[in-house]
Amino acid sequence: MPVPDALEFFIDPGRCIGCQACIQACTECDTHKGQSMIQLDYVDRAHSTQTVPVVCLHCDSPTCAEVCPADAIKRTEDGIVHTARKPRCIACNNCVLACPFGVPKMQTEMNLMMKCDMCYDRTSVGLKPWCASACPSQALAFGTREEMARLRPHAKPVNTFQFGMQTIRTKVNIMVPRDSAVEIVDVTAAIHEPTIGHEMLDDVFEPGPDRGDA
Amino acid sequence: MIQNQRGLEGPQDLDHGTTPPDGRPIGEQPKWRRDFPIDWAQDEYVSRRELVKFMVLTSAAMVVGQFWIVVKSAFRPPASLSPGLPIARVDELSIGGAKTFTYPEGSTPRLLVRTGAASFVAYDQLCTHLLCPVVPAFDEGRLHCPCHNGWFDLQTGRPVAGPPQRALPRIFVEIRDGSVYATGVEESTT
């Protein structure tokens, strides 16, 4: 049974409090074999408590499946990209390296790539994914677009991303400020900014006073 | 559904849900991309598990079917001792003469052969090889199937030459008051 079209997934990093409830809840999903598929990114840990939960965005043209040499990664009719099919996956890590969002995880003990499948056992019967059920601040939310517009008057959903030359449209939405002009989220925009914790490393390797804002 | 929405958007992939990154229609894509679609519905390869499941279930169904046949034949009701159906008068046939009849009503054609002054035999007329009608070859004491040159013994119905492997089903007949009655059909022994 496919996931209902009306129900969509919304990520709102601005609401994330870094409690890791989603990570714990994710392991409870029956299709995840006890593994957590969520990654909680710390944006700049030395200076900020800001965290970003990363679930699979379920691309329209999934790069992980494009690069799979074993034809193991499949998408169902509702647009959900699933964990690699166990009989086919050769644990080559191509998908792990190719995904613009760093979603696929290689489970070396199983020789299987596993990834967020939006808790397919739950969403395909109309329930919320575990992470969206557990998230106390609803940074991960699952519902209709109208519901989201009513609950988040200051945010709007965006589902187009830029990764280098590649434009990616996704099934999952990310919330941006409603009055901002952002229509496309550039995944690699921060790549030219100083690395996280750079001051500390700079101190160790090159204690010059002019290295701070490289 | 993603697939249907795409189908409405453009004519490029009505029967193929996968949209390649460059957006060109699927017909213009390299062969490997057409061979390995991303969408589950277009994936035609049978997985190992599906093959094993199919083979196990098919084998199990055949085993169950065999047992069902055994049980069914064990509970088959015995041939009814019907009062008999008159099929011919004795003086209607000369010795060596033959006549077709049906018994019970609506059956396949049966063949009655007079083999002596007071002896008749009757068999199903359909050859047990490929269901051609057999004809009596009285002088040789046999029944002949001309299709593939099959031969049956006239007295027993057993195959004696040619392709048939099984005996013709026998019809029991008896003579009462100058008439020949069919009284039963021999159960198949094979």
Image: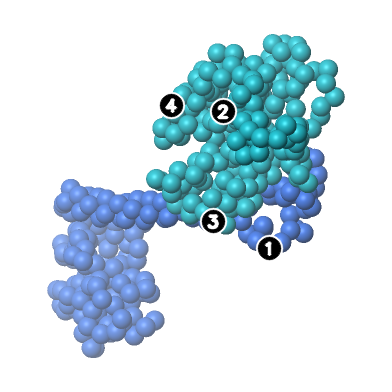
Chain colours: A cyan, B blue
**Picture coordinates of residue A29 (x, y %)?**
45, 28
Q: Chain of mark 4?
A: A
| Same subunit: marks 4 and 2 | yes
- Observer-side mark, 2 or 3, equals 2
SS for callout 4: loop
Q: Which residue is mark 1?
A: B31
Q: Which residue is mark 4?
A: A28
| Same subunit: marks 2 and 1 | no
Q: Which residue is mark 2?
A: A40
Residue lying furthest front: A208
Q: Choose top left, top right, bottom left or bottom right for residue B178.
A: bottom left
Q: Determine the CA span between mark 1 and mark 4.
A: 40 Å
Q: Chain of mark 3?
A: A
* Amino acid beneath label 2: Leu
Q: Which residue is mark 3?
A: A70
| Same subunit: marks 1 and 3 | no
Viewer-side residue, A60 vs B145: A60
- Observer-side mark, 1 or 4, equals 4
**Picture coordinates of residue B105 (x, y %)?**
33, 55
Image quarter in which the N terminus of chain B is found: top right
Q: Is residue B97 visible?
A: no
Viewer-side residue, A97 vs A134: A97
Image-based side of A178 in relation to B142, left or right: right
**Answer yes or no: do the residues labelled 4 and 3 have beta carbons within 8 Å?**
no
